[in-house]
Amino acid sequence: IYLRPENAQGEYVNYLNVQRSMRAKLPFSIGQIGKAFRNEITPGNFTFRTIEFEQMEFQTFCKEGTDTDLYEYFKNYGHQYYMDLGIAEEHLRFHDHEKLAHYAKAACDIEFLFPFGWGEINGTHNRTNFDLTRHQEYSGQKLEYLDPETNERYIPFIIESTYGLDRTVLALLCEAYDEEVIDAEKNDTRVVLHLKPSIAPYKAAVLPLSKKLSADALKVYEKLQKDFMVDFDETGSIGKRYRREDEIGTPFCITFDFDSLEDNCVTVRDRDTMEQVRMPIDEISEYISSKITF
């Protein structure tokens, strides 16, 4: 059994089929997510280095001469992507390869500052037309692109931008995880996952102050479920439930109390600041939507 060490080659041998099916003009990209396998000698650092992992990637096919600009574009795109996910710019850096692979014209990694040091989470490579040329040579199948504007045929250059999904998730967890001291004298601390609200698994949690209020609180939960992934927790003290939601990165906790039965309002607690605001139930959805924009 042969286990692929990278995802790219499947996209290369199919590029002409995709181009013809989509009637795509250069430059165009094929995106893919899938598993890759490596015979790592020293796997370790949790999920950073494993023998089986998930990759996300773009393979962009372009005309020679436009490759350098596209290479720079995808380098910067990857950098901005990680900042958009919530990683601080000072925890990211570019690492240009001094020694290039035989097929590469240029190569650069984006590295994240993990607790164990800098580690690669993204790679951008100018692979020239090496891969398609070799596939054409050994398969006997023409892989040339017919340029509709110039009527010339040529083998495209490829700009590869690949993201390690497992490493990206690990980087986000390392970036977001915090142990905050609330009150040093009382030895009161909390574990909180400061995930960007747009990527938090749950956008909010509905917490009835008492189990006697669960039926009414469930109505709020069911209403919000139509718009977001929402958690519902009625077990334990309200303080412990806040802490549980902090640990999994839920940005907002919505407390349904006895006053809610009278004024039709709830208390919304912010995960990061722990500040609370009172608002009408009908305004919760709009409030959360405004806070979780990517």
Image: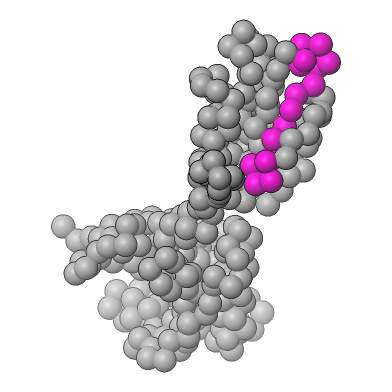
User: How many numbered marks appear?
Assistant: 0
Q: Is residue 262 part of the magenta span, yes or no?
A: yes
164 or 267: nearer the viewer: 267
- Location of residue 53 (image quadrant): bottom left
The picture places residue 159, in percent across and down from the top left corner, at 50, 76
Instruction: Give the left or right position of residue 68, taking residue 139 as reference.
Output: right
**Residue 102 shows in the view:** yes
- Quarter of the image with the N terminus in it: bottom left
Q: Tell me the quarter of the picture where residue 205 sits.
A: top right
Position in image of residue 242 (x %, y %):
58, 33
Rendered view: 53 above or below 26: above
Q: Nearer the viewer, residue 152 or 282?
A: 282
- The residue located at (19%, 61%) in the rendering is 2
| Residue 174 rendering spot, x and y as whole percentages | 47, 58
Left or right: 120 as drawn, with respect to 43? right
- State which region is magenta: 259-274
- Work out whether 13 lies above or below 96: above
| Residue toward you, 4 or 284 | 284
Is the residue 170 above or below the residue 25 in the image? Answer: above
Residue 171 horizontal/vertical position (percent): 47, 60
Res 232 quadrant in image: top right
Residue most toward the front? 185
Check if residue 231 falls in the magenta segment.
Answer: no
Residue at 51%, 43% in the rendered image: 187
Q: Residue at horizontal 44%, vertical 66%?
A: 114
Query: In the rendered image of this protein, does residue 55 appear above or below residue 132?
Result: above
Q: Is residue 21 visible?
A: no
